[in-house]
Image (tube, grey):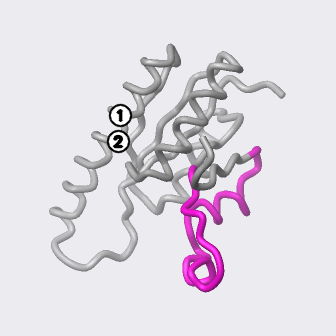
Amino acid sequence: MECDRILAPTDGSDPSARGLERAIDLAEDFGATVDALYVVDEGDRPGDWDIVVERQETAGEAALDDAESRGAAAGVDVEKHLRRGRPAEAILAFVDEHGINLIVMGTHGRSGFDRIRHAGSTTERVLREATIPVVAVPPGLR
């Protein structure tokens, strides 16, 4: 498998950090670049939209800076990308636009009723709709 671009979507959470770590490990093995992507979620949000967007963009910049630092520590090139939209849709569009070969993302490891309640999760939707391999990194795995 040719793999020169690995997408690591991040939201700054512990699960996405696990996914990022695995993406960096794989990038070391393949000699690939990691594209770290943070999507400012434009889903239905109550409240003052400008304040919500500003907070998400600030959180996104911090998450992307963290990804860049982790990559630099491992000697892996990390390109940072901040987008707006619905996360799963933005991730899938990014894959097509940037010639991504692999997606690596963390999961929350939900099961039972909690999994059913969150069936529309970003990771699950990407797993169902992606046209390239997706590595879903569960809790406890690095």
- Circles 2 and 1 in contact, beta carbons < 8 Å: yes
Q: Residue at x 41, y 53 (%)?
A: 13
Quadrant in which the N terminus is drawn: top right
Q: Residue at x 50, y 14 (%)?
A: 75
Quadrant in which the C terminus is drawn: top right
Q: Which residues are magenta?
A: 106-133
**Closest to the observer: 50 or 8?**
8
**Closest to the observer: 142 or 134?**
142
Q: Amino acid at mark 2?
A: Ala
Element at label 2: helix
| Residue identifier under label 1 | 66
Residue 16 on the magenta segment: no
Q: Residue at x 65, y 58 (%)?
A: 126
Image height of 37 relative to 27, above or below: below
**Coordinates of residue 19 in the picture (x, y in percent):** 56, 44
Q: Amino acid at mark 1?
A: Asp
**Closest to the observer: 45 or 70?**
70
97 horizontally vs 66: left or right = right
| Residue identifier under label 2 | 63
- In space, the residues marked 2 and 1 are separated at their CA atoms by 5 Å
Element at label 1: helix
- Classed neighbour count for the residue bearing mark 1: other residues with Cα under 10 Å, few (<14), some (14–19), many (≥20): some
**Coordinates of residue 133 in the picture (x, y in percent):** 76, 44
Q: Residue at x 47, y 23 (%)?
A: 71
